[in-house]
Image: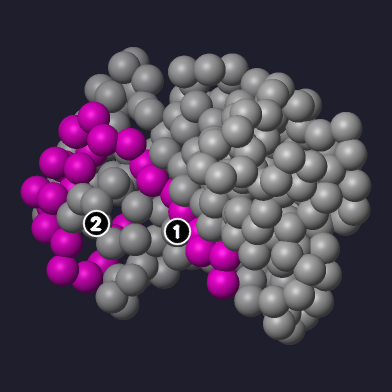
């Protein structure tokens, strides 16, 4: 029997147990069965996020040229899982974050007293549950937008990476135990995500004191190794065929609680 533990804010604790391929959810705390059923029967999606300071001893990303990756190493990143501002508590999972992303310059345009450097981004990132050493969330994407504000031949200190199914391809795959009350079933999902990068610099010093902000460009790509902090949010959109399963799972959870 595989066991994964999640701790919700406000002292609520959620245990996801998987046995013989079946997942069950036990929720403690002041959460009513009616709230569970309502959450499962809605069309709301699961919401994921992390704040850059949860891995306070490392930069989130590092890169050079046409590629960048995670810089968090083995330091834990707290992954938050929410029912899109619904009645249930936010779950917190201690994870290892990994990412590999490539950029292809798409064009630069004058804007806001500088230039907006725009790139097509492709790659993947994932979260591994430290308690179980299991990858629980993987995101694969291609043809998405990375943009950095800068001078004609430089990036300043901020950038953003955005992905959705409106352009290119974005697939979020949840590999943890199904969490039907959070509208989250195991398997691939459509959805979207965004990283906000800040304090982009070529120093990489820890602790950081504000030096060497930004990075120069050669042929529209960074010409030195850079580092940045980043925060992230993503959402999954349940497929229409999954909604009856979510509703049934919510009803089952509410009946178990009454029992």
Residue 209, percent from left and from top: 71, 82
Q: Secondary structure at mark 1?
A: strand
Magenta highlight on residue 246: no
Q: Which mark is residue 80?
A: 1
Residue 114 position (above or below residue 200): above
- How many residues crowd around disc 1 within 10 Å: few (fewer than 14), some, or many (20 or more)? some
Residue at coordinates 78% horizontally, 26% vertically from top-left?
A: 104
Residue ID at (33%, 36%): 45
Residue 18 placement (x, y as % from top left): 50, 48
Q: Nearer the viewer, residue 250 or 106?
A: 106
Q: Is residue 119 above or below residue 255?
A: above
Left or right? Give the position of 11 relative to 130: left
Residue 218 quadrant: top right
Instruction: Place residue 236 in its image quadrant.
Output: top left
Residue 85 visible here: yes
Q: Residue at x 63, y 76 (%)?
A: 56
- For label 2, the residue is 88
The one of 41 and 80 positioned closer to us in this rendering: 80
Q: Which residues are magenta?
A: 26-54
Q: Nearer the viewer, residue 193 or 145?
A: 145
């Amino acid at each position: 029997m595989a066991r994964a533990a999640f701790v919700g804010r406000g002292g609520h604790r959620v245990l996801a147990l998987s046995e013989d391929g079946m997942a069950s959810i036990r929720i403690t705390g002041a959460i009513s069965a009616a709230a569970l059923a309502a959450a499962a029967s809605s069309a709301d999606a699961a919401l994921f996020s992390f704040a850059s300071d949860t891995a306070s001893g490392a930069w989130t990303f590092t890169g050079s040229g046409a590629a960048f990756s995670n810089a968090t190493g083995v330091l834990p990143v707290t992954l938050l899982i929410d029912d899109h501002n619904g009645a249930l508590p936010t779950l917190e999972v201690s994870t290892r974050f990994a990412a590999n992303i490539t950029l292809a310059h798409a064009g630069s345009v004058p804007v806001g007293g500088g230039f907006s450097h725009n790139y097509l981004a492709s790659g993947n990132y994932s979260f591994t549950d430290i308690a179980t050493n299991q990858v629980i969330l993987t995101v694969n994407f291609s043809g998405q937008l990375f943009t950095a504000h800068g001078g004609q031949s430089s990036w300043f200190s901020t950038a953003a990476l955005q992905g959705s199914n409106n352009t290119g391809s974005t697939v979020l795959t949840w590999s943890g135990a199904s969490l039907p009350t959070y509208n989250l079933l195991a398997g691939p999902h459509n959805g979207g995500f965004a990283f906000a990068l800040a304090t982009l610099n070529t120093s990489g010093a820890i602790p950081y004191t504000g030096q060497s902000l930004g990075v120069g460009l050669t042929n529209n790509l960074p010409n030195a190794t850079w580092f940045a902090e980043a925060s992230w949010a993503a959402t999954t959109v349940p497929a229409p065929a999954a909604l009856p399963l979510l509703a049934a799972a919510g009803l089952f959870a509410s009946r178990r609680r009454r029992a």
